[in-house]
Image: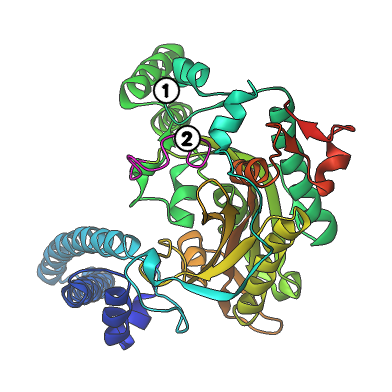
Amino acid sequence: MHDIRALRDNPAAFVSGWSSRGVEGAEALVAEILRLDEDLRAAQTTGQEALARRNAASKLIGAAMAKKDMAEAERLKGEVESLKGEIAAAEKTEAEVGKALRDLLAAQKSLAADDVPDGEDESGNVLVGQPWGRPREGGPAKDHADLGEAMGLLDFEAAARMSGSRFAVLKGGLARLERAIGQFMLDVQTNEHGYLEVNPPYLVRDEAMFGTGQLPKFEEDLFKTGDFEAAFAAISDQINEGFERYARGDVFYFMANVREALNPRYLIPTAEVSLTNLVREQILPESELATPIRFTALTPCFRAEAGSAGRDTRGLIRQHQFHKVEMVSIARPEDSEAEHERMVRCAEAVLEKLGLPYRRMLLCKGDMGFSARKTFDLEVWLPSQGTYREISSCSNCGDFQARRMDARFKRDGEKKTEFVHTLNGSGLAVGRTLVAVMENYQDGDGRIAVPEALLPYMGGVTHVGG
């Protein structure tokens, strides 16, 4: 969410910032936002002035009646009634314009940090430093899907029969290897990097999705529970079940159940949603942020992949359901840049412990996510493709998400509150890490050697398959 006062004070910065992030017609967009802002303030002023005049006239009615000036009292009563209409009209205009303004602001991307490079898409991303590790040498590398199917431990057909495309069934040693990877990552982030492990909800309300920026713009990428037909059926059931209570005036009981029936839940696309919303509508004391608050979770993630038709249709790279270890930090504004670098290093540490070659990329403005002001992607080497593929994305969102969640803090000795900064990153995507391990650790016998770091999690198993 954006600060309307900042936009009001420096509209040119928003025109430039949104244009550089691929927003067409940014100048007209800013002009429309400023027009709505002006109309909103005008409606607020009109309403406040009418309310003040009504209050003054109401007081004068009593004085006129005390003087037995009934004509003046009746005139004042007429004025009060007239002003009630003005107030109601102003309130209606304020509500309508306010909603239009909030909806328009909520649909706009975060502005990029000053050091983020220009660019329209991934071709504008910039390599940071040198790639780590040496790409796999030896004979041709099998694709992970071919390798898993040949071992009889990866079954896409069975998954398709029960769930459709972009699902997979992992069996035996491969299922255990995936579990080992997730547990290993979680242990690294908690034991070595000080993140607090959280087991959060996988289903959240729309307010939570709005807070982290998935709604309203990206609803097609989400899985939502229920539908309106089911909701109305549930309402009907509530009416029948609670008719006696409703009839005797227990309206709150009825409305609570109606709201519950009409309020769908969304399956989380990432634990970023659940973890970041832990501080929604909170005012934290600065003492709690002396060191940034750090959360981590290993959760399933669910994505509709609505915009990825034809991309990575085979294999585990782009699934509707996958597991990921997520990292989230809550920080003071002055600490967020250093915390961002620390978070990226926490993700890189996992790749290095697993011996997986990778590189760090600074995303350009056109390739960053909706809520991010700066993002680093880590890309792991996949031998079968002869290229690097994204395995972690670490973003500093500044105060963008905090404004949407109303997450603030109060500095010691200050009355005014400030918005916190939020950061999130993958530490790492479990399925993609499994792909990288399978391809980088395959041997000539069609087996997968278990990386040394994972041996304590595999119960003595040193190879999968074969």
Instruction: Name the spot of residue 221 as percent of width and height, x first.
Output: 38, 43
Q: Position of residue 15 (x, y in %)?
A: 26, 80
Q: Which mark is residue 296?
A: none
Residue tagged by mark 1?
Answer: 164
| Whether residue 14 can be seen here | yes
The reply to whether dot 2 and dot 1 touch (C-beta < 8 Å) is: yes
Q: Which residue is painted at 40% across and 12% down in the image?
A: 240
34 and 84: which one is in front? 34
State the residue position of label 2: 320
**In this figure, what is the number of numbered marks?**
2
Q: Amino acid at mark 2?
A: His
Residue at 31 percent across and 79 percent down: it is: 14
Query: Could you classify mark 1 by the number of other residues whose Cα lies within 10 Å: few (under 14), some (14-19), or many (20 or more)?
Result: few
Q: Residue at x 42, y 51 (%)?
A: 214
Residue 130 is left or right of residue 198, and the answer is left
- Residue range corresponding to the magenta coloring: 306-319
Q: Main secondary structure of the magenta part?
A: loop
Q: Nearer the viewer, residue 328 or 132?
A: 132
Where disc 1 sits, the SS reads loop
Q: Position of residue 91 (x, y in %)?
A: 23, 61
Report which quarter residue 351 is drawn in.
Answer: bottom right
Q: Position of residue 283 (x, y in %)?
A: 62, 66
Q: Is residue 118 above or below residue 98?
A: below
